[in-house]
Image: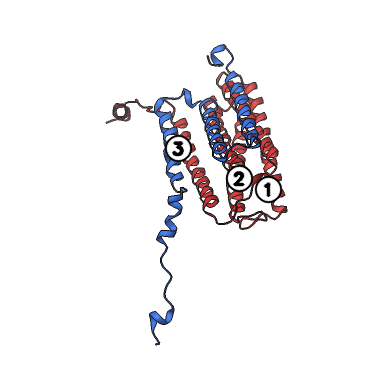
Amino acid sequence: MSASADGNPYGIYRVTWVILLIITVAMLAAEALHMPRWFLVLFLLAFMAVKAAMIGGNFMHLRHEHPRMRIMVAGGIVVTSLILLAFITPEARNVKARTTAPPLPPPSATHGHE
Amino acid sequence: MNDVAHAVDMGADWGGGVSPFGATWQKTMMWIFIITDALLFGGLLSGYGYLRMAGQSTWPATHDVFSIPFIALMTFILITSSMWMGTAVTASRLGDRKKALNNLILTILGGAAFLGCQAYEWSHLIHEGARLTSNPWGAPQFGASFFVLTGFHGSHVLSGLVILIVTAVRTALGKTPAQGVEMAGLYWHFVDLVWVFIFTLFYLLPN
């Protein structure tokens, strides 16, 4: 049951605030636990997504909006983020190396002795 | 065809009446603005990710450069100000002008405190030799990434503060409808949302 359904229209903000603080503390503490790097990265990214969803859903009231609005906002941002992330994958970073033109030959070989 | 008939036709085409997103045009446009602004930060964060992963030099360990507890304090301030902003939006919607105004003022104070912390952090790093093109800790792109990301975010916080001050004054005068407070709130929460990404991706992500 939501906090507003209990009669306190402001309760949802306090609950969200507490959860966001707990998640933030957990993210800070995670670095001290010496967990494997891949797990730490996954942990941080997962909690970042949870925090973003809580801010968007509860603070910005997106979960109360029309489904079309939710799809427009969440879908647009997620799809574009994935496209942007594709630019920083190892494959994308190698594009520069693969498309760099070979060095030009010395001037004497191209222009002769005019 | 008159305007009303045209609107009805459009509604039939979209299947959502004259309000296909179930919101007023002001709110719909605010959301579209937020999406475009989110794409701006998405591009900046992607650029930062590229620089960090494609650079030849070692990326500095952020806990060697920044005081992470201080950055956590900034995060706490911004999250708390978002809670106050949400309370102001709901109070305004319920017609409790005094509560709305009080929470708007608290939000403004929180935003100003955040900006103060950011000014301190910037001056501290500049004093230690960080510049847009170089820094004493490692990869030269580190300075550019830091100043561009936090600078853009800080400018959004500053814009948000101006909007909030105007909204608070107009609320005190009884001139801002509930929707006006809600629009200001959407922008402020967006500023908080962007910080969640910067805090995780720039300050916390390990090398």
Residue contact between numbered discs 3 and 2, judged by CB atoms under 8 Å: no
Vertical relation: B203 (above or below) B101: below
Provide residue A50's location: percent of width, then percent of height. Answer: 53, 30
Read off the chain for label 3: A
- Asked whether residue B169 is in view, the answer is no
Q: Amino acid at mark 3?
A: Ile
Vertical relation: B180 (above or below) B112: above
Tell me whether marks 1 and 3 sit on the same chain.
no
Residue contact between numbered discs 1 and 2, judged by CB atoms under 8 Å: yes
Q: Is residue A57 left or right of residue A31?
A: left
**Chain in blue?**
A
Crowding around mark 3 (Cα neighbors within 10 Å: few <14, some 14 to 19, many 20+) is some
Residue A77's label in the rendered image is 3
Residue identified by numbered label 2 = B150
Provide residue A90's location: percent of width, then percent of height. Answer: 46, 50
Q: Who is closer to the viewer here, B124 or B36?
A: B124
**Chain in red?**
B
Q: Who is closer to the viewer here, A39 or B136?
A: A39
Provide residue A72's location: percent of width, then percent of height. Answer: 41, 33
Residue identified by numbered label 1 = B122
Vertical relation: A96 (above or below) A85: below
State which tag comes first along the sequence, 1 or 2. 1
Crowding around mark 2 (Cα neighbors within 10 Å: few <14, some 14 to 19, many 20+) is some
Read off the chain for label 2: B
Read off the chain for label 1: B
Q: CA distance from mark 3 to mark 2?
A: 20 Å
Residue farthest to the top, as pictured: A6
Q: Quadrant of residue A74?
A: top left
Q: Amino acid at mark 2?
A: Thr
Provide residue B42's location: percent of width, then percent of height. Answer: 49, 43
Q: Is residue B155 left or right of residue B11?
A: right
Q: CA distance from mark 1 to mark 3?
A: 30 Å
